[in-house]
Image (cartoon, rainbow, N blue to C red):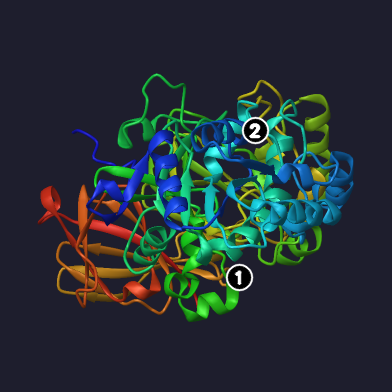
Amino acid sequence: MKPNFNKYPVVQVRENSQDCTTGWQEICRKLKTDADNRSTAKTIIVVDCYQGCYEESVLKELSGCLNPDKLFLSSDALLPENEIRSLTQNDVTDDRIFGFLTRLTLDKFFDAQKVRQLQDEIAAVNDGLVLIFGIGASMLSLEDHILVYADMARWEIQIRMRRSEVKNLGINNNDESYESKYKRGYFVDWRACDRHKKKLMHRWDYVLDTNSDIPKLVAGEIVREGLKKAAHQPFSPVPYFDAGPWGGQWMKEVCDLDKDQENFAWCFNCVPEENSMYLGFGDVHFELPSIDVVFFEPVALLGDPVHARFGDEFPIRFDFLDTMGGGNLSLQVHPLTEYIQEKFGIHYTQDESYYLLDAEDDACVYLGLKEGVDGEQMIRELKNSEATGEPFDDTKHVQKWPAKKHDHFLIPGGTVHCSGKNSMVLEISSTPYIFTFKLWDWGRLGMDGKPRPINIDHGASVIQWNRTTNWTKENLVNRTKTIDKGDGWECEFTGLHDREFIETHRYWFTKSVEINALNSVQVFNVIEGREIIVESANGSFSPMVFHYAETFIVPAAAGDIIISPHGESVGEKCGVIKAFVRH
């Protein structure tokens, strides 16, 4: 059967593609027309950029088309690289993977005296077109100006980092490793740029999309209209897929991916910090980070209780881990809350769960420790394996559970775990997604041909040694119970553990079922059935169809929804699992 997975979901904003200007010539014509209509002797166009934008090529195109009378670059006011490295060292740290979430704001990366000097030079210009360009460019203009914001999706930034095409903020490090650039981006650059962006969103005159080869420009008021629309109806972020040393083959078939690729290990399908989203204008897709919805409409999206607890952060993550025809994930553990707060500046930890979308007969999940485990001996053997390459005897220390389709394994922080081969896992978790302490990686190399980082000391500091076989069986394996049922439907509680702030419910249905809004954002995945339809209980949004394995977000402001089998699935048993924040 032909795959129907939607790899390019869209929030349709306008039916007229002319609301989105495409191509450099048309973009510059649009900006020039706006400048001319201002009927002033002097017009300032500010193009403020997010880190990861191709600044040199974008500037070349804009300045070539706009032909400004004066050009000012924000990079001329940056601190020297050595001072930026010193400023950020405590956050970047010397660790290969982990840093500390910076509290720095973007202005701290700039020389205050140079900023004032450029402000004075700009103010001294009496007439003509002035172009101010670069990261933080809006800080240089104290006068009225046309503000263009060149936003960037995080996944595209990472691809550019891998290809050594972009550098970090104020650092000439194109040739540094991807790991190094990503770490600096995650802990420093993106935090400072996000703080800056949030101050500008209500002032955007235009937003510039340079995530692809074809640049696009949309008026800021229309982008804000699109973000508001997304916060009041179900929508899906744009999923992205990536290979890994343990990757499998399931997503290739179900999600209709490139069959020539060796494998696909990951799919991030609901991590708004990382995922992009498409706003639709006719048949044109305008790409921007999906986190922009969280920044712009946090209460409508999250609901009051969730916003009160998490602010403008999205606390729920859905992703896929494909080991079908692949290998085991790394044996790992996630930090406890107090550890992630103290060591990394994150205020909640990565609790998670594995929901089995599919599994072969030999599938398993490694979860918890065996009764009578000797912690000191286990750590010694892990360190010996890291040092010598000798295999770690997991059978002596770690409990292994058989896994079948629709099983649910709960993994609160501090629990040793990993998914085994021949599984298709929907990982449902809280959002701090890079804080995995690998204990053993089965002696293999990463996709770059180098050993992946092992974090035994971090892991040893957080492993909960009392989570052994009996405790794990009672608390973490298939805690399923029916909590409600009606005509043609049933709702089950499937977790998560009491230590975790996320709760999950599973719905089986052959007929329509109404699901309450709960005053909380809810994230769904279609776990059974070829397609379903989601409707508003009060008619506030148009019906939407979602397909097998697709993830979608239902904002709190969307209200109660009705889900039903649709199309080829009418009359058949369908299923969804949803996650929401307990309150």
Q: Amino acid at mark 1?
A: Arg
Above or below 19: residue 492: below
Circle 2 sits in a helix, a strand or a loop, which is it? loop
Question: Does residue 529 lie above or below 156 as drawn?
Answer: below
Left or right, 519 with reference to 81: left
Figure quadrant of the N terminus: top left
- Residue placed under numbered mark 1 in the picture: 499
Q: Secondary structure at mark 1?
A: loop
Q: Nearer the viewer, residue 495 or 106?
A: 106
Judge whether residue 277 can be spotted in this image. yes
State the mark number for residue 540: none
Residue placed most toward the observer, 39 or 107: 39
Q: Earlier in the sequence, mark 2 or mark 1?
A: 2
User: Residue 500: x and y, percent?
Assistant: 57, 68
- The quadrant in which residue 67 appears is top right
Residue at 67% over, 38% down:
394
